[in-house]
Amino acid sequence: MANTEMLVKELADKYGRNRESLLPILQELIDERRYVNDETMINVARELDLSAAEVYGTASFYSFIETEEVGKYVIRLCKTIVCDMKGKENVLQAIENTLKIKVGQTTADKKFTLKTTNCLGWCHKGPAMLINDEVYTELTPGKAIDIIESYINK
Amino acid sequence: MINMINLTINNIPVSVEEGTTIIEAARRLSIRIPSLCNHDDLCVSGNCRVCVVEQVGNPTLQAACATPVRENMQILTNSMMVMQARKTIIELLLSEHNADCTKCYKNGNCELQDLSNEYRIGNQVYIDLIPLKHYTIDQSSPSLIKDDSKCIRCQRCVRTCSDLQAVSALSAAYKGSEMKISSFYDRPMHEVICTNCGQCINRCPTGALTERNYIDEVWDAIYDPGKHVVVQTAPAVRVALGEELGYDPGARVTGKLVTALRRLGFDSVLDTDFTADLTIMEEGTELLTRLKKVLVDKDTSMALPMFTSCSPGWIKFIEHTFPDLLPHLSTCKSPQQMFGALAKTYYAQKKGINPKDIVSVSIMPCTAKKFEATRPEMRDSGYQDVDYVLTTRELAIMIKQAGIEFMKLDDEDYDRFMGESSGAGVIFGATGGVMEAALRTAYEIVTGREVPFQNLNITPVRGMEGIKEAEVKIENVKPDWSFLEGVTLRVAIAHGLANAKRLMTAIRDGKVVYHFIEIMACPGGCLGGGGQPIPTNLEIRKKRAEAIYAEDENLPIRKSHENPEIIQIYQEFLGEPLSHTSHELLHTHYVPRKRY
Amino acid sequence: MTGKKQNDMETKKLTRVDYIFRPDNTCLDTLKKSLRRDRDEIILELIDSGLKGRGGAGFLTGLKWKLAKEAAGDVKYVICNADEGEPGTFKDREILDRVPRRVFTGMALCGYVIGSKEGFLYLRAEYKFLAPKLMSIMAEMNQEFKKLGLDFTLNIRYGSGAYVCGEETALIDSMEGRRGEPRNKPPFPVTEGYLNKPTVVNNVETFVNCTIIMGIGAEEYKRFGTDSSRGFKLFSVSGDCSKEGIYELELGMLLSDFVEEFGDGDTKAVQVGGASGFCVPRKKFNQTIIGFEGIPTGGSMKIFNSSRSMYHVLHNYLEFFEEESCGQCTPCRVGCQQLLKGIEAVKSKQRSSSYLDELVKLAKVMKVASKCGLGQSVGNAFVSIVDNFREEIIY
């Protein structure tokens, strides 16, 4: 990631170098790269004149700012009560079996990371999941597998 | 006009200024409300919730540390609701805390332990969460130990590191049950921008942040008949050690300190103040040399202002944060390290002891000195110049271990040589002290007269203001120094690294112009050092400062260049300030480090 | 538990209303009309309407605006809280999807009234898919404001997956680029909010209601609801339910009427107000009013039938809170862990059933001693579920 420095500079130019620019910058880095690593955070800290620990402390607070490597597609399956009641567990198993990973893991080809997440705001159409920013609702194990497969082929 | 607010606390009326918090208002009525996250030196946090109080009519409790008083408020600090909540909160903290108190280094000096004692917390009500967590102990640093299993997440350390020190080596990380105090990616403290200043240790209410102690190593050296153990004591230790041993803040215990060290079995009890005086000779001369090079020789490679280099926390800070300004640093080692280099050379020769048999111990108000002693640059004697650095707190522990009834000791005097000091050496322990000592000597060298301040007390450089400035006009100089005729010497002093950062930024931006700057990493200077007795606050630091200046006034010699042992060491060993030997033993260089 | 109906309390029949989702193309007319009015007059009308914040806390909206208007300072901010994270709530997403102009009009109104030139929509990361559309409507609205001579610009900011950022001061921290750790109050955001400037933070639906009130007038608005709970509100209905979805209903109905309408005929309990709300068992349905005099709700109504284990429900909530607590204050950070581990220990017989009483005491301490609304409301679900379904927790 030799161009990390450039990218962070560009983002700092775009959003500014005040503390309140920190989240917008981290968020766009997530959009670009799916996660932020130590090198990226150090660049952000330098641009914003913050300590690296402050950037790390802030980033790690937010569930959607991944601070460890994740795959190209981050699947976030809702685990909160209504999705749970509507069969989230079966959907989860179907995804796990399809991708041959457990929750929290990333596929060997770095294509998928599987996570569970808290309420996505689709309780009336549960179970629901996000793949990156895309929403999928009213999942069944079969439907979930179809969706995952469409990404495998992407 | 100040608006007064009337309220009652436990039905007792009180009238306080607007903006006062409930906890402060209660203090006026001699009501102590306990708190673990609140600290006089830090901004309000309101997160431990131990200080919650009842406000009549309000269904929820209020954090007394964070809630300003309002007119007609009725506060209850001990109601049933309060007591139940407070006890529950303490129990919760204990359930997440490695409460193995008898084996804890902070046993007996822990605010959480005190509280659970006050509330007579008995059998653990709640589930012990410790086995469910993956706590780590970070012992990577030569200065401090971070033990997350003792941490109660009050964030005093985080606020200390950011607000007082502008370092932010620590931050709160993650959230919920995973929330913890972390360095960048939880890297070892030795590998991050920590300056080892130890201010976090001074404020940690538990044993989560402690100094790395070398008590056993020092005992071993003392017990070893083949070793000659010398000890040096920093100026600020003598005005603070008493707090650990029964005295009120501000007690001067120099004589008892010396006696106690002898009783502990040190072979020679010497004084860092001696090398503080030596620092003045070297650093003062360095300053005058730099001034000459800039003003007369127009040497643009010489950096002015010159910065003092006594404070190892400050050194590591500038190495990380302002590496471009390193040429401004005086090349003088700190007094501790000058002492260390001389102990295994000059002292060894005079005593006829093989330096390999000398164990050099220093008693310091400082945790950064532990790191400083391990720096590879600090081996100019051919050995590690200072072997072990103990904080004031560790020395107190040794004194207690040895069964010494400190308050009953007679006063004794330091051994000779390297035990004599001037008042100028003593005031190194207070912010502004190095500056004052340097001015007393430099002014006299240049003009042949004493500094034009009553009784040698250069009051403009004293006090607890974060950044201080002073000017001294130099007139009627001796012929050698004619280039300084009419020059107004502009100096500045900062203590606490946040103030240092402000000053450095202003200098880098060219907003201020000075000739000489003193920086101490810790608030108040060394007397507020990270190795000093706990607790600390402004009032305590002021008391210690008063004691330092009283010590100075009571010494027969007040100027470094008049210290007879200083005169002697130049005659016998060093030659003159900035001589070849001086350069070899007493000066050093610095390493640019990464801020990230 | 609060919310038990007294005999003389006013109730309303379950009545569907249709204001919020009406086409939003007339909103600009409402704004135009309002900009000709005196700012204090608008505040008075809002106060008169009785509108309380729709996020759940229920502060009088007109009063909030009044305080922000009166707060000293040239720079002020309007923030729309679209960090809808309460389990079981999904109405704000629907509003933003279908009638965003009604939201933005409310924000502009607020800007006009309090003297703010900048408004932010704080959108939760989970709803980021809405952003392209919202941004284009924002741009269009910003142009319209200019044409109307209103110096007010809308901007968007995003959350990044933190429930606690729905708490207004945590939200402000987050916007300032910090960890979303709720602040001490006072000072309240109306005097020291975003960047320490006076700030109004209102929920999406609240701004919508402001626009509606400006359109139909407080008199008309007041016809809806009860004395304590004026107007109508969106309910997010989910769970064991014949027709899950979003419904606009008049405030002040009895829960029994609600269950009759939406339940599957076998309703055992309703969780009113999400994970931070209260669980009402069947026997209390006809004594429970949905509104500020009874159980207030941000709109989350989750229905459980007799096939559901209330232990499982509670466990799910506690896992949620244990993760989503910001972690700074002791009662919430450690309390959530203890409640969760505690019910597990009771269930697995490692602790006796009487330990539940200790946990109830703990939950009550969390309610009074936590720093913010999150920690203070964990006890709601805990106590109401344990009180009403104790056997299910133990066995």
Image: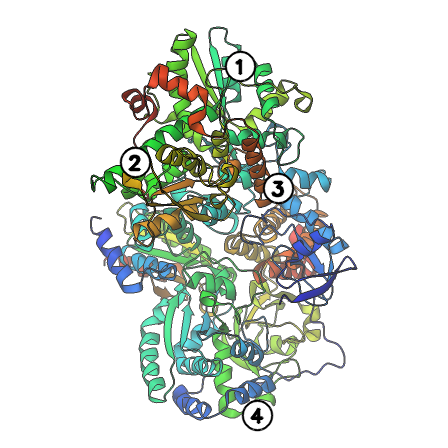
Q: Residue at x 40, y 78 (%)?
A: C117
Nearer the camera: disc 1 or disc 4: 1
SS class of the residue under badge 4? helix
Q: Which residue is mark 3?
A: B95
Q: Which residue is mark 4?
A: C220
Subunit that carries the residue with mark 2: B
Type of the residue with mark 4: Glu
Q: Which mark is residue B481?
A: 2
For label 4, the crowd category at 10 Å Cα-Cα, with few meaning under 14, some 14 to 19 and many 20 or more, is few
For label 1, the crowd category at 10 Å Cα-Cα, with few meaning under 14, some 14 to 19 and many 20 or more, is many
Type of the residue with mark 3: Ser
User: Which of pointers 3 and 2 lies earlier in the amino acid sequence?
Assistant: 3
- In the image, is residue B404 above or below residue B235? above
Pointers 1 and 4 in contact (CB under 8 A)? no
Q: List x then y, in percent, for residue B70.
A: 67, 66
Subunit that carries the residue with mark 1: B
Apparent side of residue B69 relative to residue A58 in the rendered image (left or right): right
Subunit that carries the residue with mark 4: C
Pointers 3 and 4 in contact (CB under 8 A)? no
Is B142 or A146 nearer to us in this picture? B142
